[in-house]
Image: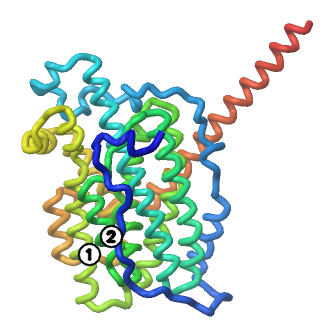
Amino acid sequence: MSTHELYTKTQVEPNWQIPASGSARFSWEYDEGRDRLLALYQKGKDKQWDGAKRIDWSLEVDPYDPLGTPDEAMTLYGTPHWAKMTDRDRGELRKHYTSWQFSQFLHGEQGAMVCAARIVESAPDMDAKFYSATQTMDEARHAEIYGRFLHEKIGMLYPINDNLQALLGDTLRDSRWDMPYLGMQVLIEGLALAAFGMIRDTTDKPLPKQILAYVMQDEARHVAFGRMALRDYYKQLTDAELREREEFVIEGCYLMRDRLRGVEVLENFGIARKEAEELSEQSEFLTLFRQLLFSRIVPCVKDIGLWGKRLQKAYVDMGVFEMGNSNLDLLMSQDEEIAEQLDRERFAQEEQERVAEVESAIADGA
C-alpha cells in the first residue's frame, strides 16, 4: 500500500525540495586523523546491523494499544472529552498518538540521513567524512525500520510536524559546514534520543522496545561524533561566531519544545486548535515529557562550548537549565548496555526454546 494512503491528511506534498548551499570539500590527506574520530568510525563499522534480521518482526502489535500507554499519560485524561469517549475511542486515540510520535521519528531519521550525507560532502577533514558515511547508513536503517513499523503494525502515518520541518530546513539551508552537525547531531538527534529513551523505558511491548533500544545504540555514537567534531571546531571561533550559533540553538530548542505537543492528534478528534493547544499546555505529563526531552541536548550544548548568558537564560526560561549538569557519557553507555542486554536475553530465551523443542521431539520419538 502506498504511504500516501496511510497519511491522516488527504493532501500531502510528495516531495520537499531544499536548494543546496555551501561547498563540497575534498581532502587529499588520507593517512592521518583524530584518533577519537577514527575509533568511532571503526565502531560504526563494527556495529552495523540488519533491521530485517535483528528485530523480531513476527511479534504482534495491537494498533489500539501499541505501547501500553497508561490513561494518565493521555492529554485528554481527566477532561470532559475523555469522559465522553468509549473504550474504542480511547484505543483510537492511543493509535493516533503512537502514529504521530513514530511518524515524527521517521521523518526525523530521513532528515538525519540527508544531513549526514551533507556532512560527508562538506566536512573539511577525512576522518569526519569517514564517520559520517557510516552514520548515513545508520540513518537509512532507522528510517527503514520506523517506516516498516508504521506500515505493518500501525497502519497510519502523520505528516511531518511544521516545527520539525522548519528546523530541518534551517539546518540544511545554512552554507556553513558545521551547521548540519549542530542542527542534526546536537538538537534533533539529542531530542530524539531522549524521546526514544522515555518510550523504551516505559513500554511493556517487546517490538517497540527492541526498535528503540537498537536505534538508540546507534544514536549514542552519532551524538558522540557531533560532540567531538564541534568541540574541536568551536574552540577556534570568535565570540561573534559563537553567539550566532547560540542564537540558532535557542531558536531550535523553542521550535522543538513547541513541536512536542501532539496538537495535530487532538485536531483529528474534532478539537479546535486553540483548545488543543491549551489542553496540551495544561497536561502535567506533557510538561514533564517536554522538560525531560532536553536531558540530552543541554549537557551536549554546554560540552561543545556554547554556554553564553543568553543561551543560559533561555534554558532557565524553559525550565531545563539544571540538565546541563547531566552525565552525557553515562547516559550513552547505558544506551549501549540496554541494547546488548536485550540481545542477550532474547537470544538466551530463543536457545532455551530450541532446546525444549529438541527434547520434546526426542521424548515423542521414544
Q: Earlier in the sequence, mark 1 or mark 2?
A: 2
Residue identified by numbered label 1? 307
Amino acid on which the number 2 mark rests in the picture: Val
Q: Is residue 184 above or below residue 365?
A: below
Could you tell me the amino acid type at mark 1? Trp
The quarter of the picture where the C terminus appears is: top right
Q: Residue 81 versus residue 226: which sits nearer the camera?
A: 81
Q: Which residue is mark 2?
A: 301
Instruction: Say if mark 1 contacts mark 2, CB within 8 Å.
Output: yes
Horizontal and vertical percent position of residue 308: 22, 78
Quarter of the image holding residue 154? top left
Q: Quick check: 288 above or below 112? A: above
Other residues around mark 1 within 10 Å, as few (<14) / some (14–19) / many (≥20): some
Say what secondary structure mark 1 lies in.
loop
Report which quarter residue 63 is drawn in. top left
Check residue 342 in the rendering and tell me which mark sits there, or answer none: none
Q: Is residue 316 above or below residue 149?
A: below
Q: Residue at x 37, y 46 (%)?
A: 103
